[in-house]
Image (cartoon, rainbow, N blue to C red):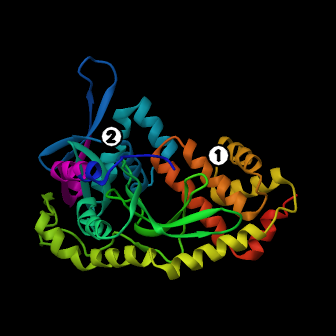
């Protein structure tokens, strides 16, 4: 399993630091503006966003969200950003003012990190962690891995007392992954994640889990639509989201029940009995398309499958999760753990179609 921070204490410390450093603004794009500033030594440039009376550098993810919202093709947006920043600023400022709308701008450490709908629910990592960590602390779980990336927060734990042999000494342990994004990258997720002891790989399952989108009432609806306002004091966030986050707590408990664990491992045992009948290389080509692997990742998955000597659907899924250990970053590693689970969750007819590829 791809390793991140080694303790919940280390994770909690960084969550608190970011909580203290982040600021959110909501207002009309008519009061926002992009400008270009030369770097201190005259080499290169920095693009900044004026939000009301303040100005912030813009991070890559926020750039992508701005371009997407204004329907500027990404390739062209990135080209202007690199080669003609003033042209990009003119484009963005024109459409900001031409099609004025209320947007949420999220900043951290003095940088714009997200450009979002004013209906985006600010369900942040500190709030999620404040409910999830105590419940994990009350259970006999072990920390598999945890991390706080630019994209998401991840908490991965296992329940060593709940395990099962899915065949020939291949033991798996129950577990759960809790993840959250503060910048519009999908949902709050609580999903079962089982760990295979023979290789310590994790496999995330979408079934039986909980996903909730960050969608709520319109923000800043105080009648003063033209003013950029700083919002979301901690007590306001706490009151608005408390009932919602309590559901996360219950979902964590649910993912670690013996009933859910048995249902998932039954699928593992079934997958172990479904053998490859076609070409191994073609099977991996089909898998690449199904779960979105790069050519390099696909080549590695083929190698893992051959080295693992388990030419079954279970072996194929574990070859995908094994690639997580070689991923470029924590986010991609977690995506690969989930990709392995998606294969297991396919209907049996789809298994047979994949395994018969020729």
Q: How crowded is mark 1: few (under 14 residues within 10 Å), some or many (20 or more)?
A: few
Q: Is 254 placed left or right of 17 in the picture?
A: right
Q: Is 118 placed left or right of 305 in the picture?
A: left
Place residue 86 in its image quadrant: top left
Question: How much space separates mark 1 and mark 2, taking CA atoms?
Answer: 33 Å
Q: What range of the chain is rendered magenta?
A: 13-34
Residue lying at 38% horizontally and 73% vertically, measured from the top left: 252
Image coordinates of residue 289 in percent, x first then y, are: 70, 56
Residue lying at 69% horizontally and 53% vertically, measured from the top left: 288
Image coordinates of residue 35 in percent, x first then y, are: 26, 37
Q: How crowded is mark 2: few (under 14 residues within 10 Å), some or many (20 or more)?
A: some
Disc 1 secondary structure class: loop
Quadrant location of the C terminus in the rendered image: bottom right
User: Is 69 part of what is drawn in magenta?
Assistant: no
Say which residue label 2 marks.
89
Q: Nearer the viewer, residue 208 or 120?
A: 208
Residue 123 visible in this rendered orientation of the protein: no
Residue lying at 81% horizontally and 65% vertically, measured from the top left: 275
User: Is 28 part of what is drawn in magenta?
Assistant: yes
């Amino acid at each position: 399993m791809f390793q991140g921070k080694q303790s919940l204490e280390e994770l909690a410390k960084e969550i608190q630091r970011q909580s203290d450093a982040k600021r959110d603004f909501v207002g009309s794009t008519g009061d926002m503006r992009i400008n270009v500033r030369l770097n201190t030594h005259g080499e290169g440039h920095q693009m900044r966003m004026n939000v009301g009376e303040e100005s912030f550098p813009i991070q890559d993810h926020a750039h992508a969200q701005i371009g997407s919202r204004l329907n500027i093709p990404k390739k062209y947006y990135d080209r202007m950003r690199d080669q003609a920043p003033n042209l990009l600023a003119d484009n963005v400022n024109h459409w900001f003012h031409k099609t004025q709308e209320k947007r949420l701008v999220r900043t951290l450490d003095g940088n714009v990190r997200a450009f979002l709908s004013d209906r985006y629910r600010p369900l942040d990592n500190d709030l999620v962690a404040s409910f999830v960590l105590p419940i994990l602390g009350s259970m006999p779980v072990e920390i598999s891995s945890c991390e706080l990336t630019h994209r998401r927060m991840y908490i991965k734990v296992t329940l060593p007392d709940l395990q099962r042999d899915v065949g020939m000494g291949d033991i798996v342990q129950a577990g759960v992954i809790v993840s959250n994004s503060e910048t519009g990258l999908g949902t709050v997720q609580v999903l079962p994640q089982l760990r295979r002891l023979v290789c310590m790989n994790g496999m995330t399952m979408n079934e039986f889990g909980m996903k909730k989108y960050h969608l709520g009432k319109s923000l800043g609806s105080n009648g003063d639509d033209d003013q950029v306002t700083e919002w979301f004091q901690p007590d306001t966030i706490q009151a608005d989201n408390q009932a919602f986050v309590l559901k996360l707590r219950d979902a964590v408990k649910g993912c670690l029940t013996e009933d859910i664990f048995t249902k998932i491992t039954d699928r593992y045992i079934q997958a172990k009995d479904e053998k490859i009948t076609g070409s191994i290389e073609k099977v991996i080509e089909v898998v690449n398309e199904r779960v979105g692997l790069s050519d390099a990742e696909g080549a590695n998955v083929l190698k893992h499958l051959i080295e693992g000597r388990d030419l079954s659907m279970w072996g194929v899924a574990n070859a995908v999760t094994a690639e997580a250990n070689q991923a470029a970053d924590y986010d991609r590693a977690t995506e690969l753990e989930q990709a392995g689970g998606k294969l297991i969750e396919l209907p049996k007819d789809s298994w047979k179609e994949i395994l018969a590829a020729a």
